[in-house]
Protein backbone atom coordinates (compact mmCIF):
# COMPACT_ATOMS: atom_id res chain seq x y z
CA UNK A 1 0.00 0.00 0.00
CA UNK A 2 1.52 3.30 -1.12
CA UNK A 3 1.26 6.13 1.43
CA UNK A 4 0.49 8.53 -1.42
CA UNK A 5 -2.19 6.23 -2.81
CA UNK A 6 -3.89 4.71 0.25
CA UNK A 7 -5.79 1.81 -1.28
CA UNK A 8 -5.94 -1.89 -0.50
CA UNK A 9 -6.33 -4.50 -3.22
CA UNK A 10 -8.32 -7.65 -2.50
CA UNK A 11 -8.17 -10.88 -4.51
CA UNK A 12 -10.28 -14.03 -4.52
CA UNK A 13 -10.01 -16.28 -7.58
CA UNK A 14 -11.45 -14.37 -10.52
CA UNK A 15 -12.60 -11.58 -8.22
CA UNK A 16 -10.68 -8.35 -7.68
CA UNK A 17 -11.54 -5.30 -5.60
CA UNK A 18 -9.93 -2.05 -4.48
CA UNK A 19 -10.79 -0.34 -1.19
CA UNK A 20 -9.62 3.18 -0.40
CA UNK A 21 -8.71 4.26 3.11
CA UNK A 22 -10.11 7.66 2.13
CA UNK A 23 -13.71 7.32 3.24
CA UNK A 24 -13.53 3.49 3.34
CA UNK A 25 -14.74 3.73 -0.24
CA UNK A 26 -15.11 0.64 -2.42
CA UNK A 27 -13.39 1.84 -5.61
CA UNK A 28 -13.31 -1.18 -7.93
CA UNK A 29 -14.95 -4.60 -8.36
CA UNK A 30 -13.93 -6.86 -11.22
CA UNK A 31 -15.13 -10.41 -11.91
CA UNK A 32 -13.58 -12.39 -14.78
CA UNK A 33 -11.98 -9.17 -16.09
CA UNK A 34 -15.37 -7.43 -16.28
CA UNK A 35 -15.66 -4.17 -14.25
CA UNK A 36 -18.88 -3.94 -12.26
CA UNK A 37 -18.34 -0.69 -10.33
CA UNK A 38 -18.18 2.42 -12.42
CA UNK A 39 -15.11 4.66 -12.71
CA UNK A 40 -15.74 8.16 -11.31
CA UNK A 41 -16.15 10.99 -13.78
CA UNK A 42 -16.45 14.53 -12.33
CA UNK A 43 -18.68 15.44 -15.26
CA UNK A 44 -21.34 13.20 -13.72
CA UNK A 45 -20.31 12.15 -10.19
CA UNK A 46 -16.81 12.08 -8.64
CA UNK A 47 -17.39 9.10 -6.34
CA UNK A 48 -17.88 5.35 -6.68
CA UNK A 49 -19.35 3.95 -3.45
CA UNK A 50 -19.29 6.44 -0.57
CA UNK A 51 -20.13 5.48 3.01
CA UNK A 52 -22.97 7.56 4.50
CA UNK A 53 -22.70 8.46 8.22
CA UNK A 54 -24.06 9.83 10.53
CA UNK A 55 -26.93 10.94 8.28
CA UNK A 56 -28.34 9.81 4.95
CA UNK A 57 -29.60 12.45 2.55
CA UNK A 58 -29.78 16.19 3.11
CA UNK A 59 -30.22 18.04 6.37
CA UNK A 60 -32.20 21.29 6.37
CA UNK A 61 -29.88 24.12 5.29
CA UNK A 62 -27.00 21.68 5.62
CA UNK A 63 -27.28 21.80 9.42
CA UNK A 64 -28.32 19.61 12.34
CA UNK A 65 -29.28 20.60 15.86
CA UNK A 66 -28.03 18.75 18.95
CA UNK A 67 -28.73 20.06 22.44
CA UNK A 68 -29.88 23.37 21.02
CA UNK A 69 -26.61 23.92 19.12
CA UNK A 70 -26.27 23.93 15.34
CA UNK A 71 -23.71 21.74 13.56
CA UNK A 72 -22.73 21.85 9.85
CA UNK A 73 -23.84 18.32 9.01
CA UNK A 74 -24.71 18.33 5.32
CA UNK A 75 -25.41 15.77 2.62
CA UNK A 76 -24.75 12.18 3.79
CA UNK A 77 -22.61 13.25 6.75
CA UNK A 78 -18.82 13.23 6.87
CA UNK A 79 -17.53 9.63 6.87
CA UNK A 80 -16.77 9.69 3.14
CA UNK A 81 -14.37 12.61 3.72
CA UNK A 82 -12.39 10.98 6.55
CA UNK A 83 -9.31 8.77 6.49
CA UNK A 84 -10.01 5.31 7.95
CA UNK A 85 -7.44 3.11 9.67
CA UNK A 86 -6.75 -0.59 9.08
CA UNK A 87 -7.82 -2.95 11.88
CA UNK A 88 -7.13 -6.25 10.09
CA UNK A 89 -6.52 -7.51 6.58
CA UNK A 90 -5.84 -10.58 4.45
CA UNK A 91 -5.70 -11.23 0.71
CA UNK A 92 -9.51 -11.31 0.41
CA UNK A 93 -10.54 -9.27 3.43
CA UNK A 94 -10.02 -5.92 5.14
CA UNK A 95 -11.54 -4.27 8.21
CA UNK A 96 -11.30 -0.49 8.55
CA UNK A 97 -12.36 1.85 11.33
CA UNK A 98 -13.02 5.50 12.07
CA UNK A 99 -13.21 6.98 15.59
CA UNK A 100 -14.41 10.39 16.68
CA UNK A 101 -11.86 13.14 17.05
CA UNK A 102 -11.86 16.92 17.23
CA UNK A 103 -12.79 17.18 13.53
CA UNK A 104 -15.82 14.91 13.78
CA UNK A 105 -17.01 16.36 17.10
CA UNK A 106 -17.16 19.80 15.46
CA UNK A 107 -19.72 18.30 13.07
CA UNK A 108 -21.38 15.67 15.25
CA UNK A 109 -20.86 15.86 19.03
CA UNK A 110 -20.86 12.16 19.81
CA UNK A 111 -18.18 9.62 20.72
CA UNK A 112 -18.41 6.80 18.18
CA UNK A 113 -16.55 4.13 16.29
CA UNK A 114 -17.54 3.13 12.77
CA UNK A 115 -16.11 -0.12 11.47
CA UNK A 116 -16.40 -1.17 7.81
CA UNK A 117 -15.45 -4.68 6.75
CA UNK A 118 -15.10 -5.94 3.17
CA UNK A 119 -15.12 -9.69 2.41
CA UNK A 120 -14.41 -10.67 -1.20
CA UNK A 121 -15.08 -14.01 -2.91
CA UNK A 122 -14.90 -14.88 -6.61
CA UNK A 123 -18.28 -13.42 -7.51
CA UNK A 124 -19.32 -11.67 -4.30
CA UNK A 125 -18.50 -8.75 -2.05
CA UNK A 126 -19.95 -8.60 1.46
CA UNK A 127 -19.83 -5.30 3.32
CA UNK A 128 -20.42 -5.27 7.08
CA UNK A 129 -20.71 -2.04 9.05
CA UNK A 130 -20.71 -1.77 12.84
CA UNK A 131 -21.66 1.49 14.55
CA UNK A 132 -20.59 1.75 18.20
CA UNK A 133 -21.56 4.35 20.78
CA UNK A 134 -18.46 5.11 22.87
CA UNK A 135 -20.14 7.93 24.79
CA UNK A 136 -22.44 8.35 27.77
CA UNK A 137 -25.53 9.57 25.96
CA UNK A 138 -27.85 7.99 23.41
CA UNK A 139 -26.37 8.46 19.94
CA UNK A 140 -28.72 9.23 17.02
CA UNK A 141 -27.28 8.14 13.69
CA UNK A 142 -28.07 6.88 10.22
CA UNK A 143 -25.88 4.75 7.98
CA UNK A 144 -25.91 4.05 4.27
CA UNK A 145 -24.06 2.32 1.44
CA UNK A 146 -24.04 4.08 -1.95
CA UNK A 147 -22.36 1.90 -4.63
CA UNK A 148 -22.54 2.98 -8.26
CA UNK A 149 -22.60 0.09 -10.73
CA UNK A 150 -21.75 0.23 -14.41
CA UNK A 151 -24.90 0.69 -16.46
CA UNK A 152 -24.67 -1.22 -18.69
CA UNK A 153 -22.43 -3.75 -16.92
CA UNK A 154 -22.95 -6.64 -19.37
CA UNK A 155 -23.22 -4.94 -22.74
CA UNK A 156 -26.40 -4.10 -24.59
CA UNK A 157 -28.48 -0.97 -24.18
CA UNK A 158 -29.49 0.68 -20.91
CA UNK A 159 -33.10 -0.27 -21.77
CA UNK A 160 -32.08 -3.95 -21.59
CA UNK A 161 -31.76 -3.57 -17.80
CA UNK A 162 -34.25 -3.60 -14.94
CA UNK A 163 -34.49 -3.64 -11.16
CA UNK A 164 -36.37 -6.60 -9.70
CA UNK A 165 -37.49 -6.30 -6.07
CA UNK A 166 -37.74 -9.25 -3.71
CA UNK A 167 -41.21 -8.21 -2.50
CA UNK A 168 -44.07 -6.07 -3.76
CA UNK A 169 -43.36 -2.35 -3.27
CA UNK A 170 -45.57 0.69 -3.71
CA UNK A 171 -45.39 2.47 -7.08
CA UNK A 172 -45.98 5.75 -5.19
CA UNK A 173 -42.69 7.33 -4.11
CA UNK A 174 -41.85 10.56 -2.25
CA UNK A 175 -41.35 13.75 -4.20
CA UNK A 176 -37.99 15.31 -3.32
CA UNK A 177 -37.99 19.08 -2.89
CA UNK A 178 -35.41 21.23 -4.75
CA UNK A 179 -33.27 21.45 -1.58
CA UNK A 180 -33.14 17.66 -1.28
CA UNK A 181 -35.67 17.41 1.55
CA UNK A 182 -38.53 14.89 1.55
CA UNK A 183 -41.99 16.27 0.92
CA UNK A 184 -45.28 14.63 1.92
CA UNK A 185 -46.30 14.56 -1.76
CA UNK A 186 -46.11 11.26 -3.65
CA UNK A 187 -45.85 10.51 -7.34
CA UNK A 188 -46.48 7.38 -9.37
CA UNK A 189 -43.68 5.73 -11.38
CA UNK A 190 -43.72 3.14 -14.16
CA UNK A 191 -43.52 0.16 -11.84
CA UNK A 192 -45.65 -2.94 -11.32
CA UNK A 193 -44.50 -3.43 -7.73
CA UNK A 194 -41.77 -5.96 -8.50
CA UNK A 195 -40.18 -5.16 -11.87
CA UNK A 196 -38.90 -1.66 -12.58
CA UNK A 197 -37.89 -1.15 -16.24
CA UNK A 198 -34.94 1.20 -16.70
CA UNK A 199 -34.73 3.83 -19.41
CA UNK A 200 -32.83 7.04 -20.08
CA UNK A 201 -35.70 8.94 -18.44
CA UNK A 202 -36.03 6.89 -15.25
CA UNK A 203 -33.93 9.32 -13.21
CA UNK A 204 -34.59 12.49 -15.17
CA UNK A 205 -36.50 13.99 -12.23
CA UNK A 206 -34.91 12.69 -9.03
CA UNK A 207 -33.82 9.60 -7.12
CA UNK A 208 -36.40 6.88 -6.59
CA UNK A 209 -36.78 6.37 -2.83
CA UNK A 210 -38.55 3.29 -1.50
CA UNK A 211 -38.97 4.11 2.18
CA UNK A 212 -39.74 1.33 4.68
CA UNK A 213 -39.25 -1.16 1.86
CA UNK A 214 -40.59 -4.67 2.25
CA UNK A 215 -37.75 -6.06 0.18
CA UNK A 216 -34.48 -7.04 1.80
CA UNK A 217 -32.85 -7.08 -1.60
CA UNK A 218 -33.08 -6.35 -5.31
CA UNK A 219 -31.57 -7.68 -8.54
CA UNK A 220 -30.09 -5.38 -11.15
CA UNK A 221 -30.75 -7.54 -14.19
CA UNK A 222 -29.08 -7.25 -17.56
CA UNK A 223 -28.64 -9.13 -20.82
CA UNK A 224 -26.22 -11.98 -21.50
CA UNK A 225 -27.47 -14.07 -18.61
CA UNK A 226 -26.26 -12.11 -15.58
CA UNK A 227 -27.56 -9.92 -12.77
CA UNK A 228 -26.09 -8.07 -9.79
CA UNK A 229 -27.89 -9.17 -6.66
CA UNK A 230 -27.99 -6.81 -3.66
CA UNK A 231 -29.08 -8.49 -0.41
CA UNK A 232 -29.18 -6.47 2.81
CA UNK A 233 -29.67 -6.82 6.55
CA UNK A 234 -30.35 -3.92 8.88
CA UNK A 235 -31.48 -1.38 6.30
CA UNK A 236 -35.00 0.06 6.01
CA UNK A 237 -34.84 1.98 2.72
CA UNK A 238 -33.83 1.30 -0.88
CA UNK A 239 -32.71 4.25 -3.00
CA UNK A 240 -32.07 4.13 -6.76
CA UNK A 241 -30.20 7.03 -8.33
CA UNK A 242 -28.36 8.10 -11.45
CA UNK A 243 -27.94 11.21 -13.54
CA UNK A 244 -29.30 11.65 -17.08
CA UNK A 245 -26.77 10.30 -19.55
CA UNK A 246 -24.45 8.93 -16.85
CA UNK A 247 -23.18 5.34 -17.30
CA UNK A 248 -23.93 4.25 -13.73
CA UNK A 249 -26.78 3.23 -11.47
CA UNK A 250 -26.56 3.47 -7.70
CA UNK A 251 -28.41 0.84 -5.69
CA UNK A 252 -28.29 2.36 -2.23
CA UNK A 253 -29.17 0.96 1.20
CA UNK A 254 -30.06 3.49 3.92
CA UNK A 255 -31.15 3.19 7.55
CA UNK A 256 -32.43 6.80 7.57
CA UNK A 257 -33.32 9.48 5.03
CA UNK A 258 -33.25 13.21 4.39
CA UNK A 259 -35.00 15.77 6.56
CA UNK A 260 -38.72 16.23 5.87
CA UNK A 261 -39.72 19.59 4.41
CA UNK A 262 -40.25 22.00 7.30
CA UNK A 263 -38.39 19.90 9.88
CA UNK A 264 -36.84 22.09 12.61
CA UNK A 265 -36.29 19.56 15.40
CA UNK A 266 -33.20 18.05 16.94
CA UNK A 267 -31.17 15.38 15.18
CA UNK A 268 -32.56 12.78 17.60
CA UNK A 269 -36.11 13.76 16.55
CA UNK A 270 -35.43 13.43 12.84
CA UNK A 271 -37.57 10.65 11.31
CA UNK A 272 -35.71 7.45 10.45
CA UNK A 273 -32.79 7.91 12.85
CA UNK A 274 -31.46 4.99 14.89
CA UNK A 275 -30.86 5.60 18.60
CA UNK A 276 -27.88 3.71 19.97
CA UNK A 277 -27.56 3.45 23.78
CA UNK A 278 -24.20 4.02 25.48
CA UNK A 279 -21.68 1.20 24.90
CA UNK A 280 -24.04 -0.44 22.38
CA UNK A 281 -23.28 -1.63 18.85
CA UNK A 282 -25.46 -2.02 15.75
CA UNK A 283 -24.61 -4.02 12.61
CA UNK A 284 -25.70 -3.39 9.02
CA UNK A 285 -24.62 -5.54 6.08
CA UNK A 286 -25.02 -5.85 2.33
CA UNK A 287 -23.90 -8.62 -0.02
CA UNK A 288 -23.33 -7.87 -3.70
CA UNK A 289 -23.24 -10.90 -5.99
CA UNK A 290 -22.85 -11.46 -9.71
CA UNK A 291 -25.38 -14.19 -10.48
CA UNK A 292 -26.59 -16.19 -13.49
CA UNK A 293 -29.82 -14.64 -14.69
CA UNK A 294 -31.60 -18.00 -14.42
CA UNK A 295 -31.08 -17.74 -10.67
CA UNK A 296 -31.78 -14.04 -10.53
CA UNK A 297 -35.10 -13.61 -12.30
CA UNK A 298 -38.37 -13.93 -10.41
CA UNK A 299 -41.13 -15.79 -12.17
Image: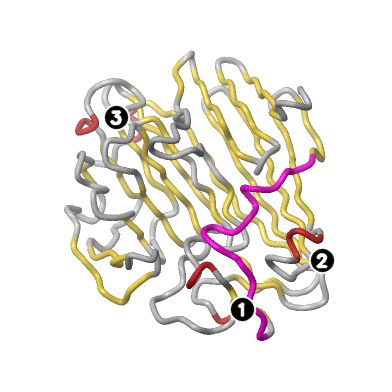
Q: Which mark is residue 65?
A: 1
Residue 21, compared with residue 57, is above or below; it is above
| Precedes in sequence: disc 1 or disc 2 | 1
Q: Between label 3 and label 2, give the one nearer the viewer.
A: 2
Pointer 3: what residue? 222
**Residue drawn at 41 percent across, 75 percent down:** 260
Residue 201 is situated, as x and y percent measured from the top left of the image, at: 19, 44
Mark 3 crowdedness (10 Å alpha carbons): few <14, some 14-19, many ≥20:
many
Q: CA distance from mark 1 to mark 3?
A: 44 Å
**Residue drawn at 75 percent across, 69 percent down:** 110
Q: Is residue 3 left or right of residue 194?
A: right
Q: Is residue 260 left or right of residue 266?
A: left
**Residue drawn at 33 percent across, 49 percent down:** 165
Q: Between label 1 and label 3, give the one nearer the viewer.
A: 1
Residue range corresponding to the magenta coloring: 68-85
Identify the image quadrant of residue 113.
bottom right
Identify the image quadrant of residue 298.
top left
Mark 2 crowdedness (10 Å alpha carbons): few <14, some 14-19, many ≥20:
many
Q: Considering the numbered disc 1 on the image, is that residue within a helix, a strand or a loop? A: strand
Residue 227 is situated, as x and y percent measured from the top left of the image, at: 36, 31
Q: Quadrant of the N terminus?
A: top right
Which residue is nearer to you in this view: 67 or 212? 67
Pointer 2: what residue? 134
Residue 25 is situated, as x and y percent measured from the top left of the image, at: 61, 39
Q: Considering the numbered disc 2 on the image, is that residue within a helix, a strand or a loop? A: loop
Which residue is nearer to you in this view: 238 or 40? 40
| Precedes in sequence: disc 3 or disc 2 | 2
Amino acid sequence: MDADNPVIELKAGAGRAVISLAGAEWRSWIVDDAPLLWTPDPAYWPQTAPVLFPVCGWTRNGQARVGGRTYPLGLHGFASQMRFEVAARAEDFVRLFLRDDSRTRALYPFAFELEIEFQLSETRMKTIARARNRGRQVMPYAFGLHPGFCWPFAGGRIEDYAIVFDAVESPQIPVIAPDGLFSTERRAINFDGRNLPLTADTFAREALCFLEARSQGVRFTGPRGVAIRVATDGFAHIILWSRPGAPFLCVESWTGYGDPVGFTGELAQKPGMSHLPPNAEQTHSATYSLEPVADALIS
